[in-house]
Amino acid sequence: MTIKQSVEFKKEELTRYSRNIFLKEINFEGQQKLKNSKVLVIGAGGLGSPLLYYLAASGLGHLSFVEFDSVDLSNLQRQILYDTHSIGRKKSLVAYEKLSALNPEIEIQHFSVKLNSENAFEIIDNVDIVVDGSDNFPTRFLVNDVCYFKKIPLISGGVLQFYGIVLGILPNQTSCYRCLVEPNPNVTENCSTVGVMSPAAGVIGALMANETIKFLLQIQPNIINSIIRIDLLNLEFRKTTLPKNENCILCGKNPKYTEFNPYLVDYKETCGSLSFSIYKQYL
Ligand SMILES: [Zn+2]
């Protein structure tokens, strides 16, 4: 965690954050902690939009995010950081403008690059927690692996159709993402054809923001070492402990990977039925 510092607030900030400060679980001290905190968000799409909005609005002092894509008309159904005028522009720039306009009191940094195995170790660094709202499994495995070796806490989320999961990992203390999910190179179906319920992305993204703030303020219980499975079609929420996997190639008894090596692991772009089966499996 960031070393505690005493933080001064301007009068306007006290008004801006007053509804946080009124909460006994946050209070003035919690708001100071948020201002000192550093969070990296992976992806500024369907999950990243509500996630970044709420973290920025809440006064998260040092907020950074990674996003490479440009805004497409088909994004606007759920990616609420963007509007019709944003089409064709880089998401990172539009998101930076929107978040800066929402809260000019915080420091926002954007990485307009595609996160890959050659830049991830450098980008995922010097933060209190990483929050992964990416839309594909190779990125999630990559983020998981870097966080594991750098001992950075990770909240990971995913949404597909009406279903979603959110889970929280503390490297070396809890299970990791690879304990739950194994890459399947045989999957070829494209995730963009499966569909996503618009507000489902909002529910999952907002839940990730909620748990990020609770983790930073150590409000218990929080998502760490848990997985929440959400079925918004049948309106069911279930929380369980992260399952242990002693055969995990990363954090199991005999790990296959003992250091982060971008040339050792093949992070291919696959998505689709793998992800769908994962969501169904945990519901
Ligand atoms: Zn593991």
Image (cartoon, rainbow, N blue to C red):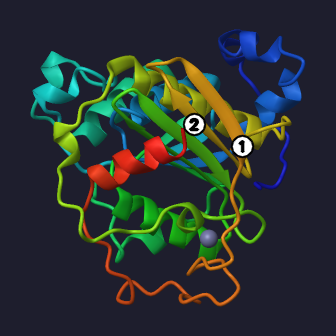
- Residue 104 at least partly seen: no
Q: Secondary structure at mark 1?
A: strand
Q: Ligand 1 sits in which quadrant?
A: bottom right
Residue 229's disc number = 2
Asked if residue 236 is positioned above or below residue 91 in the image, the reply reads above
Q: Nearer the viewer, residue 2 or 70?
A: 70
Q: Nearer the viewer, residue 252 or 28?
A: 252
Query: Mark 2 or mark 1: which comes first in sequence?
Result: 2
Q: Nearer the viewer, residue 247 or 224?
A: 247
The image quadrant of residue 247 is bottom right
Residue shown at 68%/70% (left/top)? 151
Residue shown at 65%/32% (left/top)? 238
- Measured from the top left, where is residue 8 in percent x and y? 78, 31
Within 10 Å of the Cα at label 2, are there few (<14), some (14-19), or many (20+) other Cα atoms? Answer: many
Residues at discs 2 and 1 in contact (Cβ within 8 Å): yes
- Measured from the top left, where is residue 235 in percent x and y? 53, 17
Q: Please name the residue that numbered disc 1 is placed on.
A: 240
Q: Quadrant of the N terminus?
A: bottom right
Asked if residue 95 is positioned above or below residue 27 in the image, the reply reads below
Q: Secondary structure at mark 2?
A: strand
Horizontal side, residue 80 vs residue 214: left or right: left
Q: Which amino acid lies under the numbered mark 2 shown in the image of this protein?
A: Arg
Asked if residue 176 is positioned above or below residue 241 in the image, the reply reads below
Residue shown at 65%/77% (left/top)? 251
Within 10 Å of the Cα at label 1, are there few (<14), some (14-19), or many (20+) other Cα atoms? Answer: few
Residue shown at 57%/41% (left/top)? 166
The image quadrant of residue 150 is bottom right
